[in-house]
Image (cartoon, grey):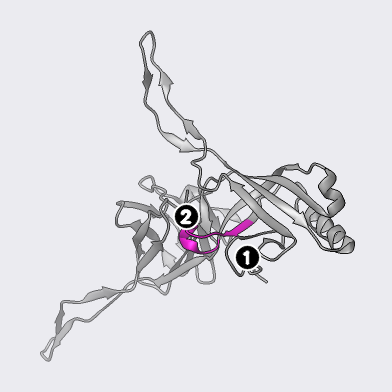
Amino acid sequence: MAVGDLITTDWELEFRDLLMGGTTDYNILQIDGLLDLPDIVSADQGRLRRHGLRAGDDFLAGRSVVVTMEVYSATEAGYTSAIQSLKEALRPGVAEVPLVFQLPSVAGGAKFRVDARVRRVSWPVTLNHFFRKDEITVEFYSTDPRLYANALSTETATLPTAGGGLTFDATPDFSFGATSTGGELSLDNDGAWQTPVVFRIDGPVQTPRIIHNGLGLELELDLTVATGDYILLDSESRTVLLNGTASRYSSLTSDSRWFDLEPGVNQISFRGATTAAGSLSATWRSAWV
């Protein structure tokens, strides 16, 4: 079962294979931090012996999501089981794992996620515990402030090939007006914020280039990807890996510039020094903040 498949309706969330909200034993009372703008990390600098600051770039810090819920069960056995399952799901850890939501009007009403860790659990024991009804607060923290579509998007294109010209029956033969087909991708970021993208180049292709036509930016590699090999370029981690392991970052040409996908449709071109059977795949999730 894929992450998020347990969610079937609004006002539900899933974390480490535990479904909360809806008709479960965990009634969601309040969620803070999802629609808030995360803290700003500013690069403004002080001006020597003058008022004001020198304006720098602003970036978003991580996102804190605080969920307040009520744990309830009609039976003692059910209550004990619900507490045990929740304690197990909320164990702290090093790796961030998907926290998936479905809420009306957020991220277009579809399932969305943040990758998060549990940072705090407030679970007071009151008289309500006797009646098998506790109210708890859980803080999830994500180092990435974006809200991502739970559904992964992918597109693939091959290198362009020539064709479609006019040929005349003459000696020698003449042809003109040839056009290229292939080599183009339309990547739709359905969100409202820039989102990272992972490109995969499968060989054979010599000196592959990935061009964002709207931004006028490109990634070019001064190498040949052999048949059976592939290169992964991750715009978030800024890595270039041969067959997913060996770094080829030094193969990026000096004119290369990393880019994310802008909101809306992003037109991407795939080119190589020679026409071959190489292909380019792109994988991404739409993003919001």
In the rendered image, residue 122, in percent from the top left (x then y), is placed at 75, 41
Q: Residue 143 sits in which quadrant?
A: top right
Three-letter amino acid code at disc 1? Gly
33 vs 76: above or below: above
Give left or right: position of 56 versus 122.
Answer: left
Rendered view: 119 above or below 41: below
Residue on which disc 2 sits: 287
Give the image location of residue 65, x and y in percent: 61, 45
> How many numbered marks, from 0 up?
2
Mark 1: secondary structure: loop
Q: Secondary structure at mark 2?
A: strand
Callout 2: 10 Å neighbours few (<14), some, many (20+)? many
Q: Nearer the viewer, residue 72 or 168?
A: 72
In front of the other: 24 or 1: 24
The percent coordinates of residue 211 (x first, y second) are 34, 57
- Pointer 1: what residue? 4
Query: In this view of the protein, can residue 202 be seen by the observer?
Result: no
Q: Nearer the viewer, residue 182 or 150?
A: 150
Q: Residue at x 87, y 58 (%)?
A: 80
Q: Which residues are magenta?
A: 99-111
Marks 2,1: beta carbons within 8 A: no
First of labels 2, 1 by sequence position: 1
Viewer-closest of 214 and 130: 130
- Crowding at dot 1, Cα within 10 Å, few <14 / some 14-19 / many 20+, comes out as many
Q: Is residue 107 magenta?
A: yes
The percent coordinates of residue 274 (x first, y second) are 35, 68
- Asked where in the image residue 98 lies, by quadrant, the reply is bottom right
Residue situated furthest top in the rendering: 49
Q: Is residue 126 left or right of residue 32?
A: right
* Residue appearing at x 85%, y 61% in the figure: 81
**Amino acid at pointer 2:** Ala
Residue 243 is a magenta residue: no
